[in-house]
Image (cartoon, grey):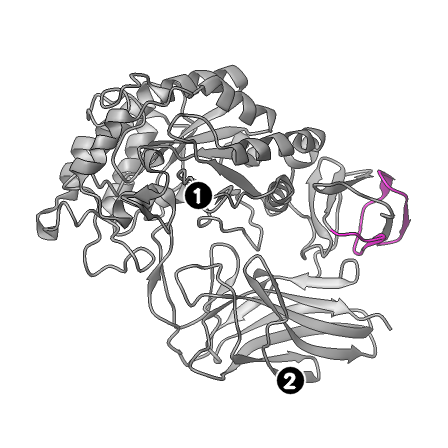
Amino acid sequence: MLPKWFEEARFGMFIHWGLYAALGGFWKGQEMTYIGEWIQARFRIPNEEYAKLAETFDPVKFNADEWIRTAAEAGVKYIVYTSKHHDGFAMYHSKVSSYNIYDATPFKRDPLAELAEACRKYGVRLGIYYSQNLDWHEPDGGDPGPGYPSNGGMMSWGNDWDFPDYDKKNFRRYFENKVKPQIRELLTNYGEVSVLWCDCPLDMKPEFSQELRAFVKELQPNCIINQRIGNNCQDYGGLGDNQLPIDRRKDTRESPVTLNHTWGYKKNDHAWKTPQHIVRTLASLAARNANLLLNVGPMPDGDWPEGTKNVFAGITPWIREHADAIFGSGSNPFAVDMPFGCCTVSGKNLNLFVDQDVPEIVLNGILSKVVSATVPFTQDGEVLRLDTTGLSDPLLACVTVTFDEVPQVRQDLIPQNGVLHIRPRNGEAIHGEDAAESGNTTVSADGEKEGSKHSSFGRDGSLQFWDNPADRIVWPVILPAGRYRILLETRNRATWDAHAEWFGDRKAAWQLGDLAGETELVRESGEGGSGVSCLAECELASEFRGDFMLRTAEVLSENAVHMDLIGVRFVKVAQ
């Protein structure tokens, strides 16, 4: 069972900071095309050369109090600090290895000790990231070997440039001599540690994940461990890098998200997300019972980039105003998604986050009595109408509806505000007997292998590798009489980037009662890496209660990409 603090937190701050920040994404005049903290692997920098960065690494502008105060004012409930990333350099004073910020640099301070003190001062929980498998500085550091799919098709996971003899590597030696001793330091020298955040388990054997979990619980029984410890030894589930959930689960999950394109600092990456984007992501995650772990990548001098500062300055007032609707909130109580935004529950309040300009919101299936609302309303049985004329907020508008009890709603798949927006996990995925090959095996950014002959639900709730015509998915829907456009939302899985755009070249088959058809999927519009196709338009003479079936029908060319199914929308057409 997860601790109450984590279930209510909703907002954490990741801190990716290490020697890689000194390079800022450049090595000998070449610019890094991948995330900043992987620069040593990307350019295969020998340890002897990379270690020289420590000689001039002196973050004189580092101010733990300012970092944590800024985070706390923005509503951050916990941090996760990179104590050792894959480069093996400890960003704390380690007695286990002199390859650390205290002994190897002119800085001669322990940032983790100062952050732990600031966390206690501002009531923010301390979490620590530790790369338990990969360590490019150590000859025995994790390395899945030459037969393992590369990272993004461009680099090795382990250090095979300094230590090319794979057969001589002894992971047990590294685990006993560095991992466990450094974990002991981290969990005994800095007070209460609420989270241990592991990464890239790759081919780690179950015995190591199990042993590490037992060791952590022996040192700090209340410290929770994320999914990337590997081999199902976690306390809580997590999503992939910059992966947002489509569904919602009973157990709270966590989504790690960057502020630009990178985790570690890159001087040329100015693609900063806006405060509006961040608060909408925060609300959307809360509606799906997930925490936002928002990353900052400090510069080599210890200061935050201006883009990072601007985002925190922009989100702080909004989060302060809407704290009750976010922190400690429950997820969307309806079975379907809201077409106008998202919603949470806090006590007897239903909080509607409205990211579109709509004059009215009509909610169906309301079983509790409304006492008040922040906009004019009428309630007629199970139908609630809210007048949102003029509702406006530069970041994200919020309407709060107060009931006479914790709001109760019907769990049928019915339209809300004229749209029925269903997700794959609302339905039942059924596998046929035939198995079609679904692409090559790849490895995700967090080291998980992907590839299947049948469709399967992904961690985010999508229906992954939705390619097999023998497979189908069925939803029990209720639709009032009227004319509907059926929109299909899909995503490309052809590359290692799970968020690449989709570009078609296939058909889909559907059935709604006596109505059925096959449609070539043509990309209609896109946002956030998703593709939208109009599957069909259909007329319902009377209310429909029954199954809606969907499957891949035919691949039209060798250029067809492998797809994830992420949603279906029935949009009522005005007549």
Query: Which residue is the site of mark 2?
Result: 517
The quadrant where residue 97 appears:
top left
In this picture, residue 237 sits left or right of residue 158: right
**Does residue 83 appear to the left or right of 482 in the view shown?**
left
Q: Where does residue 542 sit, x and y in percent of width and height?
A: 83, 76
Numbered mark located on residue 512 in the image: none
Q: Residue 289: horizontal and vertical position, in percent?
A: 58, 44
Q: Which amino acid type is shown beneath numbered disc 2? A: Gly
The numbered mark, 2 or 1, whose residue comes first in the sequence reads: 1
Q: Is mark 2 on a helix, strand or loop?
A: strand
Segment tinted magenta in the rendering: 356-383
Question: Where is residue 490, by image quadrant?
Answer: bottom right
The residue at the point 42 percent across, 28 percent down is 222
> According to the image, label 1 marks what residue?
268
Residue 100 at least partly seen = no
Q: Nearer the viewer, residue 217 or 397?
A: 397
Give the quarter of the figure containing the C terminus. bottom right
Q: Is residue 324 left or right of residue 197?
A: right
Q: Which mark is nearer the camera, 2 or 1?
A: 1
Say if the magenta span includes residue 422.
no
Q: What residue type is labelled 1?
A: Asn
Residue drawn 22% across the image and 48% down it = 44
